[in-house]
Image: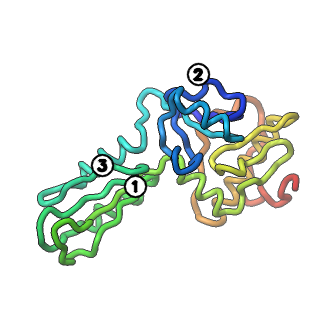
Amino acid sequence: MRAHRLEGRTAGAHDIEGRVLVHDLGPDLRKGTVLTAGNLDRVRQAGEVHVVELEPGDLHEDIAARRLAAALSGPNLQARPPVQSQARLIATRRGLVRVRAELVDAINALGYMSVFTLMDGQAVAEGEEVVGCKVTPVAVPGRLIEEAGMKGHRAGGAEVSGKHANFFLARPGASAEDVHRLLVEVQAAVLERSGLLLRPEVRLIGSFEPPDLLRAGGDGGAP
């Protein structure tokens, strides 16, 4: 997928049609909405707007959640339609829950999706939620960056968005070195806090000093 940062006031229909909103614009326009020309007035009321453009092979998070729920479903379970990338499996009769904990752990270890269940052997009534699953392809890296305290962090003219931490912004005058430095500092902060090394999807073109993740981030960037 490709990320786009829009200035809401100057956005046109071609900027939003078919693209997916990655943050709420209010209770009437929620994260995950596939935008249409009919949403243009609402987008223009906003300031900075972030969307993603799905590319061939990409799945909208709700479609992915629906497929995940179908894969997890079994006898006496009914999958409910996903809401904001989260789907639920409901018991269709009274019984005892059996959970394959090793399978749940393996799925959760993949990243970008979460499965949560009742306890193995727990009694359930008809209509009770047994399993929940959520797909968060955009939110997970952003959450890790925000938890590492890097939301709004700057390195020269490059900055982590203050609205959604999964977007890096190049302000006027920013250099490629600024963007690379910001990338490395964010990687270092997330690695130190969570033990996870975020890997960029972009390809770097040019010569850059090999990042030293132990040293990166020590001088903090511009205030």
For the point 24% across and 55% down, which residue is it?
72
Q: Quadrant of residue 134?
A: bottom left
For the point 82% across and 48% down, which residue is it?
155
Relative vertical location of residue 111 with respect to residue 36 in this rendering, above or below = below
Q: Residue extending furthest top?
A: 14
Confirm whether residue 88 shows in the render: yes
User: Which label is found at residue 134?
Assistant: 1
The residue labelled by disc 2 is 14
Q: Quadrant of residue 144?
A: bottom right
Marked residue nearer the N-terminal end (1 or 2): 2
Q: Kindly indicate whether the residue at mark 3 contacts the one at mark 1 (C-beta within 8 angstroms).
A: no
> Which class describes the residues within 10 Å of circle 1: few (<14), some (14-19), or many (20+)?
many
Marked residue nearer the N-terminal end (1 or 3): 3
Horizontally, residue 222 falls left or right of residue 33, namely right
Confirm whether residue 202 shows in the render: no
Q: Kindly indicate whether the residue at mark 2 contacts the one at mark 3 (C-beta within 8 angstroms).
A: no
CA separation in Å, label 1 and label 3:
12 Å
For the point 23% across and 68% down, which residue is it?
128
Secondary structure, mark 1, is strand
- Which is nearer the eye, 5 or 147? 5
User: Which label is found at residue 81?
Assistant: 3
Secondary structure, mark 3, is loop
> Residue 119 placed where, x, y %?
27, 75
Secondary structure, mark 2, is helix
Horizontally, residue 213 falls left or right of residue 39, namely right
> Residue 188 placed where, x, y %?
70, 57
For the point 25% across and 59% down, which residue is it?
89
> Which class describes the residues within 10 Å of circle 2: few (<14), some (14-19), or many (20+)?
few
Q: Amino acid at mark 1?
A: Lys
CA separation in Å, label 3 and label 2:
29 Å
> Which class describes the residues within 10 Å of circle 3: few (<14), some (14-19), or many (20+)?
some
CA separation in Å, label 1 and label 2:
30 Å
